[in-house]
Amino acid sequence: MATDPFNFVTTRWSLVLSASEGSELAMSKLAESYRIPLHSYITALGYTQEADDLVQEFFASKFLKEGFLHNTQQGDRRFRTFLKACVRHFIIDTKDPCRRRRVPGDRPGDLSLEMETDEGAFTQQFAAREVAADLAWDRAWARELLQRAREKLNAECERARKIELLHQFYRVLDEEPDAPSRREVAQACQMTEGAVGVAFYRMRERLKALLADEIRETVTNPNDWMEEQRHLLSVFSAPYHPNDLRDPLR
């Protein structure tokens, strides 16, 4: 356990360790939580038709059984980079024709010219697609964390009986084409425009805090936490697909 004043509790790492000890519930949670980023990454590498099967195979038969967890709890790590490295190695091992043709005991020097040619072609294609795949991974990862933060804010506002106001807040935040003006929100929620402004500001700040908490659970120290926040928020600033969630800090 970290001894710094932030008292980091790395929930994602706890799930990994539980899963590595045979917890089916922990494995299920990991698979459910990160299926979409994994699917986005694999799709961007060009395996569109196989993405669903590859994600399932990764979690079911590879993730905890192929040495991916070796020394993962040592040093400063970010769960995002760790998991991407795991799936990257999995894809290379699964799709590289050279590796698939090897049998136990083969050495690189034993490979035929044909196999070396296949390996070169695969490496070139993989490298050409990897930049786009990395961006797809980071965007999907950021969307996943933001969606979790939104779900927590939803629960809080529902308990406070402010769910309708929150829905209006999201419409404005996401810049929907028919997003209401502050005056229209005030009329719909029977509030003053000033009260709507204050409420939206508080929701925005709360969403920022919840998102920071989600990011915090995926790293092991405060320095990584701050850097990870900067990186993931920069992802929202890059050109994005229309389905991307908006930057909550803008």
Image (spheres, rainbow, N blue to C red):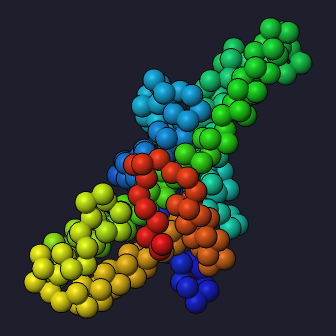
Residue 96, how many percent across, how many down? 68, 23
In the foreground, 236 or 110: 236
Q: Residue at x 71, y 33 (%)?
A: 128
Image-quadrant location for residue 206: bottom left
Can the viewer see residue 27 in this picture? no
In the foreground, 149 or 116: 149
Q: Residue at x 43, y 79 (%)?
A: 209
Q: Point out the image quarter for the N terminus.
A: bottom right
Q: Image height check: is 85 above or below 181?
A: above
Residue 73, how many percent across, how many down? 63, 62
Residue 39, how many percent across, how many down? 47, 39
Residue 58, how many percent across, how many down? 50, 36
Position of residue 11 in the picture relative to residue 154 (left or right): right
Q: Residue at x 63, y 54 (%)?
A: 81
Position of residue 111 in the picture relative to residue 94 (left or right): right
Can the viewer see residue 53 in this picture? yes
Image-quadrant location for residue 78: bottom right
In the foreground, 92 or 104: 92
